[in-house]
């Protein structure tokens, strides 16, 4: 929590650790983007130093059942935006459930309900990171992105491509994965 003085009035604002780490020194001017949450018994301000953090916070609160502002703040404090997006796009339940307060079922719900909302851009970012790391899932991610570019929904492409990889094995090429997945999707 930080207290921001604006025109002689101090506002208590709850912020994620990612914003706290980048906060300017005490007494400095700072721009904080806020989300005003109104409950029956309280009005709470949540603050963020970037629009991306605030957007993800709002996405979590609005679109994932069982996730309120407190848990959404914990998610932003527990993982960087890029790590979280990559985990969602790649269905990495284990990574998400390591966040304090997030269990396996909540992590699964986040992946299920956010995968399509994070969009193709997050998929491209995730694939790029995997290419840089030389990940064994590189061919799978490339295949999923190819299927998305052909017009299939991200969740459908991911689900069917993973089924194909389970049959073909981890050493399957991108072309093999796309070809066999298209056979399943068209049939």
Image (spheres, rainbow, N blue to C red):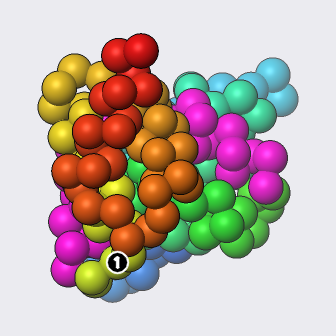
Q: Residue at x 39, y 22 (%)?
A: 185
Residue name at image x 53 percent, y 52 percent: 167
Q: Nearer the viewer, residue 87 or 65?
A: 87
Residue 112 visible (yes or no): yes
Which x, y percent locates residue 88? Answer: 49, 51
Query: Picture coordinates of residue 182 (x, y %)?
Result: 31, 29
Picture quarter with the C terminus: top left
Task: Choose between 24 and 126: the one closer to the eye.
Answer: 126
Could you say where residue 2 lies in the image, as x and y percent from the top left?
Answer: 53, 67
Mark 1 lies on a secondary structure that is: loop
Above or below, 164 relative to 114 = below
163, 98: nearer the viewer: 163
Which residues fall within the magenta stretch? 104-132
Magenta run includes residue 37: no
Is residue 176 rendered to the left or right of residue 8? left
Q: Image check: 50 left or right of 102? A: left
- Pointer 1: residues within 10 angstroms few (<14), some, or many (20+)? few
Q: Is residue 68 rendered to the left or right of residue 142?
A: right
Measured from the top left, where is residue 63 in percent x and y? 57, 26
* In the foreground, 186 or 110: 186
* Location of mark 1 (residue): 135
Name the residue rendered at 71%, 28% in the picture.
Answer: 65
Can residue 120 be seen here? no
- The answer to whether residue 82 is above or below residue 67 is below
Q: How many marks?
A: 1
Q: Quadrant of residue 150?
A: top left
Q: Residue at x 34, y 78 (%)?
A: 135
């Amino acid at each position: 929590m930080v207290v921001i003085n604006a025109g002689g009035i101090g506002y208590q604002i709850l912020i994620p650790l990612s914003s706290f780490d980048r906060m300017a020194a005490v007494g400095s001017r700072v721009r904080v983007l806020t989300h005003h949450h109104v409950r029956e018994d309280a009005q709470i301000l949540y603050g963020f130093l970037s629009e991306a953090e605030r957007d993800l916070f709002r996405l979590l609160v609005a679109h994932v059942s069982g996730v309120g502002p407190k848990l959404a703040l914990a998610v932003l404090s527990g993982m960087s935006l890029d790590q979280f997006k990559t985990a969602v796009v790649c269905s990495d339940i284990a990574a998400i459930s390591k966040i304090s307060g997030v269990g396996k079922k909540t992590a699964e719900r986040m992946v299920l309900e956010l995968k399509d909302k994070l969009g193709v851009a997050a998929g491209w970012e995730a694939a790029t990171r995997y290419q840089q790391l030389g990940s064994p899932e590189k061919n799978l991610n490339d295949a999923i992105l190819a299927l998305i570019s052909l017009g299939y929904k991200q969740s459908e492409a991911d689900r069917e491509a993973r089924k194909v990889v389970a049959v073909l094995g981890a050493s399957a090429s991108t072309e093999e994965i796309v070809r066999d997945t298209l056979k399943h999707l068209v049939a």
